[in-house]
Image: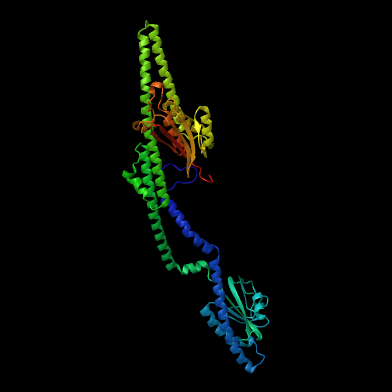
Amino acid sequence: MGPPTGRRPRLPLWTWLVLSHLLAFALPVAAFLGTGAFAMDLQRQTRKSLENQAVLLELLIRAELRQAREHDPQAGVAALADQLDPALDEFAQSTFAGVRVVDLDGTVVASTGPMLGADLSGRPEVREALAGRAGWINRKSPPVAPGRGQPSAVPAEGERLYVATPIQLGPEPDAPVVGALLLSRSPRGTWQVLRNMGPRLDVGISASLVVMLGLVASMGWGFSRTIRRLSRATDRLAAGQGPDTPRDPDLGRALGSRIDEVAALAEDFRAMSDRLRARLEYIAEFAGNVSHEFKTPIATLRGTLELLEDDPEMPATQRALFLTNALAELHRMQRLVDGLLALARADQRGQREPVDLGALATELAALHPGVQVQGAGATVQADRRQLEVALGNLVDNALEHGGAQVRVRLRPWVEADRCGVDVEDDGAGISEANQARVFDRFFTTARERGGTGLGLALVKAVAEAHGGGVALESRTGHTRFRLWLPLPTPGR
């Protein structure tokens, strides 16, 4: 692993997987706690609990008040203080809720805490209850004014939920209100609930983390193993050992990966290695061919110069013959160099533009008297100059090898997914032995006429560089070279 670049760290794949999974594990928890939804639900549960408890206390107070009014028809909730205090204390011990009973003036007449006699009429929830409607609020209670028997103000309490309900003489909705119940309790906090759930929660989180880390380790090992295999195959390719897929276990196993992207990467790597191997073989073969083709003229030139140097008294006619031969070899070498440069450029992707093959065939026919054009072509994206050279080579080849009376025709054509130009002649044809070699570099049957054997090789290179190809059919009286290219994909 190389040094990190920039400020971003370079970490192993399994480390990134662990970090990403931990983040994915933590995000729901953070959303659960951060949105406050859990705290709101705890508050709602507390409110419902206090409301239910208020209903039970109201039934108790209503029953006691009915008994008290049998002796005093005007008795209110203040008359029940002595009976209510023990019941409220017992209630508070079992529910952990604070309870206050207020009369119609908002004065506390019974309480589980130190607020007996306090005036609560200013509290909105108490006003709502005395008006016959239940109310609730969540707040910190401010200090209250001293009530009966209270020497000073009562200190403020902590954050609590207050629920106030009316005390009515009967169960009917329109029954007279004689007071109100004010119940309060601190809702359970989120962290308090989590601490109470601690043992089971710890076991669940630990088990989830173990399972998650196990999955991460398995996935990371599988991913890294495939990438390491491709890395080893790349190293072999860089060292000049082109991977042979049937015998390369690393690349073969990567191709069998169950991960679609990894298998696609391995397939792309195999295609790249095949192209590189083919290119290396092409370069090696090309270098051998060039060496062979240049060896003969170089040897001829060397011999000629040595003879001229060794025999200064050579007759002028013989000297002129040697110089003529040497100049012919130099011209041949120049043609070879020009052909090799054209062949090298054909392998490169040149500037592509729309090219009408029918119009191009017509232009070529105009340069060669007697050449006919039959048919209409299609428009392709191609290097116009390269196509012009390729088709020109095919026409020149037909005119040169077809014979004195040969007739040459250019036939543009279009099929379902490809198009091209056929170059036909009615010459003597090409023998079966030569048909298999006509596209080979430096193969020529006209070497004595200065042929380099690069013309048809250039045609093949241009066609393949454009994603197409060239094919040959030949018999006595009919020869056809078919140059074809793929049609452009719609929308591209």
- Please tell me whether residue 387 is drawn above or below residue 157 in the rendered image: above
Q: Residue at x 61, y 89 (%)?
A: 65
The residue most toward the left is 247
Task: Find residue 202 and report its horizontal and vertical position in percent.
Answer: 43, 65
Q: Taking the image as drawn, is residue 420 in sight?
A: yes
Task: Find residue 7 and report its horizontal and vertical position in percent.
Answer: 50, 44
Judge by depth and name the residue closer to the eye, 461 or 212. Answer: 461
Task: Find residue 196 and report its horizontal and vertical position in percent.
Answer: 47, 69
Q: Residue at x 43, y 19 (%)?
A: 331
Left or right: 119 as drawn, with respect to 377: right
Left or right: 313 as drawn, with respect to 103: left
Judge by depth and name the residue closer to the eye, 390 or 79. Answer: 390
Q: Taking the image as drawn, is residue 97 in sight?
A: no
Task: Find residue 490 and report its horizontal and vertical position in percent.
Answer: 52, 46
Left or right: 176 as drawn, with respect to 3: right
- Please tell me whether residue 380 is drawn above or below residue 97 in the rendered image: above
